[in-house]
Each structure stands twice: as C-alpha cells, then as structure tokens.
Image (spheres, rainbow, N blue to C red):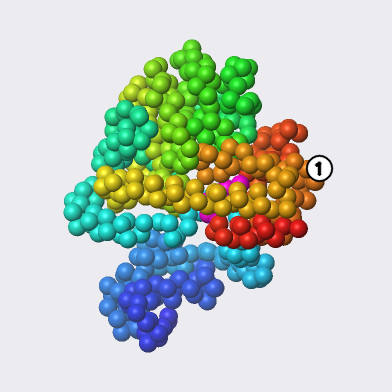
Amino acid sequence: MLTYSLDKKGTDSLYEFLYKCIKKDILNGTIAANEKLPSKRSFAKNMGISVITVENTYSQLMTEGFIYSLPKKGFFAADIKNTMQKKELPAENDIEDKTCEQNKCNADCTATQTDSRNFPFATWAHLMREVLTQKQTDLMKNPPAGGTLELRKAIAEHLKGFRGMTVSPQQIIIGAGTEYLYGLLIQLLGFDKRYGVENPGYSKIAKVYKSHNVECSFINMDKAGVCVEELEKTLTDVIHISPSHHFPTGIVMPVSRRYELLSWVSSSPSRYIIEDDYDSEFRFSGQPIPTLQSIDISEKVIYMNTFTKTLSSTIRISYMVLPANLVRDFHSKLGFYSCTVPTFEQFTLASFIGGGYFEKHINRMRKLYHTKRDSVINALQNNKYAHKIEVLEKDAGLHFLMRLHSDICSEHFLKQLESCGIKIMPLCAYYKNPPDSALHYFVVNYTSAVHEKIVDAIEHIQ
C-alpha cells in the first residue's frame, strides 16, 4: 500500500502533495509501469484523508497521462520511460559574460544603449501614477490593432509641429519595435514583392526580410543616396531608405534625388518607399530636413520612426504612417492583430508627448549630444593621429564617419583602439560586398559611452 508522510507536505495542499509524490515515484520507477494503484477508498483510509482528496490527485495524474484507469479494474501507472537526463551546466568561466565585456570597454562607439542619467525618470513616474489613477477603465480595454487613439493623436500633433507632416491619427500604426512593423508591412504589401535595402545599410532590415522568406536586393548608393538605376535593374518593388540621415554613411539625400525616387515609385502601382526617419530629431545645424512623405502626392511613401533613439533603447515603441489607401487594406487584412505595445505604456507616452515633456526632453538631449559629439571630435583633432583623421557627416544624427588617411591596416587600427578601450565598427561591416573605397572608414556612435571616457581613451592611443 502506498504511504507518504504528510509531515513533509510543507505549504502544499494535500492533493498537490500526493500528486507530486506519486508522479515522482512513477518517473523514477519506484512505481513500475502498469503497476496497479490502490483504490481511492483504501488509499484514503490508509492515509487518513478524504476520498475527495484522492479523487483530485488521481484526476490530475490522469489528465497529465501519468496514470490510466480500466473499467471495474482500477487505476494503473502509465508506461513512462524517464529519458530525461540532468543537463550539465557549463562551468562559470565558460559562460560568455557580456556585462564584463562592456565594463572592460571604456568607450563603446557601437552601442545605442541609453545612459540612465539621461532618462526623465521623475516625469515618467509622475505620468505613470496619473495614468493609473485616471485611466483605470481605459487600461482594462483592449486597444485597436493600430494602437490607442490618444497616442496616435499625440504622435500626429508632434509630426505636424516638428516634421511639417499633416497626417490623421488613423494613418498611424503603433508597434513594439520597427522589426515588428516591417513584418506587418510584408504581410500588407505582399510576399510576392521584391524588397530593397540600402548598401551599405542597417543589416537587421535585410535579416527581417530574409526571415519572412521574401526576395531582397541590396541597392548600391552614390553620394546622393540609393541609385534609381539600381532599383530598375533589380526589379525592386519596395525600397527602404533613410533620406534625412543615412545609416551608416550619414548622407542627407538632396531634393533632386528625392524627386527621382518619387517619380520612380509613382510609375508602378506595386511600388512603395519605406522612409526610416530614425534619428531626425538630432540635427545640429540648420533646420530639420523635410520628410519624403511630406512632399509625396502619390501616397506611395510609408513613414517610420521610433522612440528608441529619443527616449530609451529599451522602450520598444515605434510607429509607421501609412498612406490613406493602405489604411483600409491594413484593417481589412491585419485588423485582427492585437497591438503589441501595452496600453499602460501607450497612455503614459501619450501624456509625455501631449504635456510638452517630449519636446523639452528632445531639446535637452540635443544639447547634451551636441556637447558629447564636440568633445569626441576635439579629442580626435588633438590626438597624435589628428593629421591623419578626417571627420565626415557630423552635423546630423547620433553618429559620424571617421576616415583614416593612412596606409595602416584597418584591422591593426581597430586592435589599437580596442587595446585603449575604444570599440568602433568599420564601414565595411555594413556592406553586402564592401568595395575598396570603404577601407579606412569607421562609424563612430557616441551616444551610449561616457564622453569623458572616450576622450581619455583616445588620448592614450599609441
């Protein structure tokens, strides 16, 4: 007869304790396969517990397949072969510790992580409390597929005031990161389309297209941006571009090339342009560059932006502005999707934008990044390598190009920087097939590293 000491049940209920004991004995072979278990009444009497408790125990074990019953014969242990082996954990020294790597690096000019000192925690916490007290009913409602109307209205007002774009809130679709929105666009525009990405460009975009099994072309660029001839040659239908500040070259697309692209996209109903405006808020000279969407009269430009650059890399809230004709298609094809951004965060961000806090934050961050950029450039210009270093495309966005006028091997130069605690990426890393002309160019992202450490590290280059 099965017997278990009830003194060992701890905080478990009686039926949970018995369930775990019997399950364990079946798995380790103490109760053999097809061995008959005691009847509910005899087991209950032996243990001094109620029959209901045994019924609950057997019921759970049967549901999970650990025991089975035969009519008028009783309950039996299932034939379960315990093939699970204890996984040997890797030695602590074998585990790759990214945190340690980051600590060893004094100036990581490849990362985009936000410095915690720059996030408006006090304001954000205040707005969160307001949302919790004033929006309790709304917080329990599922938002539409495009996101809460409050956030879309706030974004529309921001785009009108800052980017000169006149769009309706209904055109705005909220999503948890631009990668998710790319996936939606592929479903919306079609898997039969050929998508194009800039070469060089942000490699993750091509990976998203590849993961969705759609054809993707790498479109070569000249000094004005993507070449229209390349689009025609590759039969591209949808091209992703960043005209206001190309990543990684920093090119600002001139108006002549913009109109060439608009002419190209309007010549076929299957063509569209995805305009990535990822860091347009941080232009350090002159006025913000007008968006391609604002001069598009054929409704063929899909505008996309994110709050990961302006607020925090961990706030996964992005949005796209669809042309009016695609809004209807979106709701008919993809309206069944739930918005991937929690309602609570959407209301908080809407209050942050609508209350004027976002504009103040951008102005503060623009000054901060301007100062940090100048410190890094000054350190480069006052270094022993200064006569060999040229800084390019420094007036827009949160990175610039550094060209090394030297015959020194790029790999050797990178190792030299790494030994001084500086981590940067070569421009070649962003090409599909890097040309020789890309040698000796490096991409310097200065947002996440403390600029004092960058300056100190640069001064110690040998």
**Vertical placement of residue 296 versus 211, above or below:** above
Label 1: element kind: loop
Q: Is residue 316 visible?
A: no
Q: Residue at the spot x=66%, y=36% of the render?
A: 431
Q: Which residue is mark 1?
A: 407
Q: Residue at the spot x=32%, y=69% of the render?
A: 56
Q: Is residue 330 left or right of residue 231?
A: left
Whether residue 376 appears in magenta in the rendering, the answer is: no
Q: Is residue 271 left or right of residue 175?
A: right
Amino acid type shown at disc 1:
Asp
Quadrant containing the C terminus is: bottom right
Q: Nearer the viewer, residue 31 or 95?
A: 95
**Vertical placement of residue 91 versus 405, above or below:** below
Q: Nearer the viewer, residue 218 or 37?
A: 218
**Vertical placement of residue 121 versus 427, above or below:** below
The quadrant where residue 99 appears: bottom right
| Image coordinates for residue 95, horizontal then vertical, percent | 64, 65
Q: Nearer the viewer, residue 396 or 20?
A: 396
Q: Is residue 78 visible?
A: yes
Quadrant containing the N terminus is: bottom left
Q: Is residue 46 left or right of residue 462?
A: left
Overall secondary structure of the magenta stretch?
loop
Range covered by the magenta-colored residues: 444-449
| Image coordinates for residue 413, horizontal then vertical, percent | 75, 50
Q: Residue at the spot x=34%, y=48% of the render?
A: 360
The quadrant where residue 233 appears: top right
Q: Residue at the spot x=40%, y=56% of the render?
A: 119
Instruction: Report crowding for label 1: few under 14, some 14 to 19, many 20 or more residues within 10 A (C-alpha).
Output: few
| Image coordinates for residue 153, horizontal then vertical, percent | 27, 37
Total numbered labels: 1
